[in-house]
Amino acid sequence: MTLIQEKTIAAKVRSDFPILNEQIHGKPLVYLDNAATSQKPIAVLNALQHYYKHDNANVHRGVHTLSSRATDAYEGARDKIAAFVNAAFRQEIVYTRNASEAINLVAYSWGLANLQPGDEIILTVMEHHSNLIPWQLIAQRTGAVLKFVELTETEEFDFDHFKSLLSNKTKLVAVVHISNTLGCINPVKEICAEAHRYGVRVLIDASQSVPHLPIDVQDIDCDWLVATGHKMCGPTGIGFLYGKLDLLRSMPPFLGGGEMIADVFLDHSTYADLPHKFEAGTPAIAEAIALGAAVDYLTNIGMDKIHAYEEELTAYLFQQLEQIPEVRTYGPKPKADGSGRAALAAFTAGGTHPHDLSTILDQAGVAIRAGHHCTQPLHRYLGAQSTARASLYFYNTREEIDVFIAALKEAIEFFGSLFG
């Protein structure tokens, strides 16, 4: 992709995101907090509004026109998501509130039914709390044991260490696809292949990859994959779980209530087929429909183009950060073309606290994240209390990176003069 193509992509899409026109403290917004949540295009905002203005009704079982239209849009969004990740069957896509709920669904449904004392669950030291705490809770209840893959010298997934942890005791591998702190892209296809040699199930947390990379669950051959809508141009309150059809059918319900039943009697019930067995109660109808609109939007741009563009932005971001002596970035360095890692940089700047950096950058209109990014154990492993993080998306530009770098240099100089 040439620089001209790159600029054309950014220039073409930025007008689709009204919030990018915001002024922050009198400065144009430079939004570099995309790993926490993405901004929403007009097409997604319109989908939310259209549902409430024209189709607002509960889905399923209703025979009147509004209910039929709402159901068609709601289930149509499921079809779009299934195609987006190349699921073999639409029933393999289960709506959840977010990736956290999707992981909890697997933990409490499959985990409680299948894990025994002494069984082992392999995680990594880089996991988001959402893919750590549910397994801690399940391990406490079942007697299962947690094992953790450590990092290589380049702060990436240590595949050799992973292989050494696998054994006949291993029952589950749950691993993030892209670390929201290190930016490393874990070899999930190879992880699945190695785990399956032992008959081990694999769950992939794809919250940071589905918005940025082409994802093919059949090629990866994972047993489950989770993602959240708000990081992929969709609204909050909606995400999804992908699971292999036979595996999902073997799992007991997670929540009970309306929608997930076939027949109900006073003393027992039978349950609906997939995916509704896992979708108790009135769902997030508008949010699901809007997530379908987000999938359409991303598909129309092309995930391969988004990924290629972000690689160029990543290369430029790291080139600029490496020119600041005080800055220490975490995770692998990108290759010259920006490949090999995600479009984010977690960093420290000497002795300046990341929260102070973020506060000063906000005065310049630049939004970054500061803290432990829900990876507290990873930060302890790295010996860092917290980090600042700049994270990019396809609507960001090199010019915005320049504004960020200039503001970062000024912030470092300012705190250096205070405490130097």
Image (cartoon, rainbow, N blue to C red):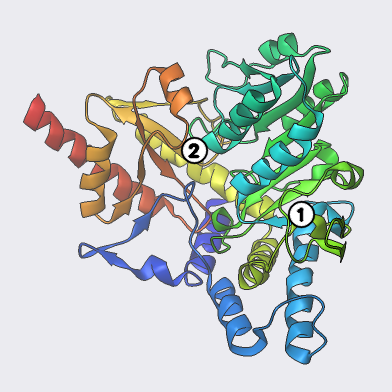
Residue named by callout 2: 315
When asked about the image quadrant of residue 173, the answer is top right
Residue 272 showing in the rendered view: yes
Residue 84 appears anywhere in the view: no
Report the side of 381 relative to 142 (left or right): left
Give the amino acid type for the residue marked by disc 1 in the picture: Phe
Q: Nearer the viewer, residue 266 or 360?
A: 266
Locate the C terminus by quadrant: top left
Residue 112 higher or lower than 97, as above or below = above
Q: Is residue 67 left or right of residue 31?
A: right
258, 209: nearer the viewer? 258
Residue 341 position by quadrant = top right
As drawn, is 26 to the left or to the right of 104?
Answer: left
User: 91 or 253, which is in the foreground?
Assistant: 253
Q: Amino acid at mark 2?
A: Ala
Q: Residue at x 60, y 30 (%)?
A: 137
Earlier in the chain: of badge 1 and badge 2, it is 1
Q: Secondary structure at mark 2?
A: helix
- The crowd level at tag 1 (other Cα within 10 Å; few <14, some 14-19, many 20+) is many
The Cα–Cα distance between marks 1 and 2, rounded to whole angstroms, is 42 Å
25 versus 176 height, above or below: below
| Residue closer to the observer: 273 or 127 | 273
Q: Nearer the viewer, mark 1 or mark 2?
A: 1
Q: Residue at x 24, y 32 (%)?
A: 353
Q: Residue at x 84, y 40 (%)?
A: 219
**Left or right of residue 275, residue 346 in this image:** left
Coordinates of residue 213 in the picture (x, y in percent): 66, 46
Q: Mark 1 sits on what residue?
A: 278
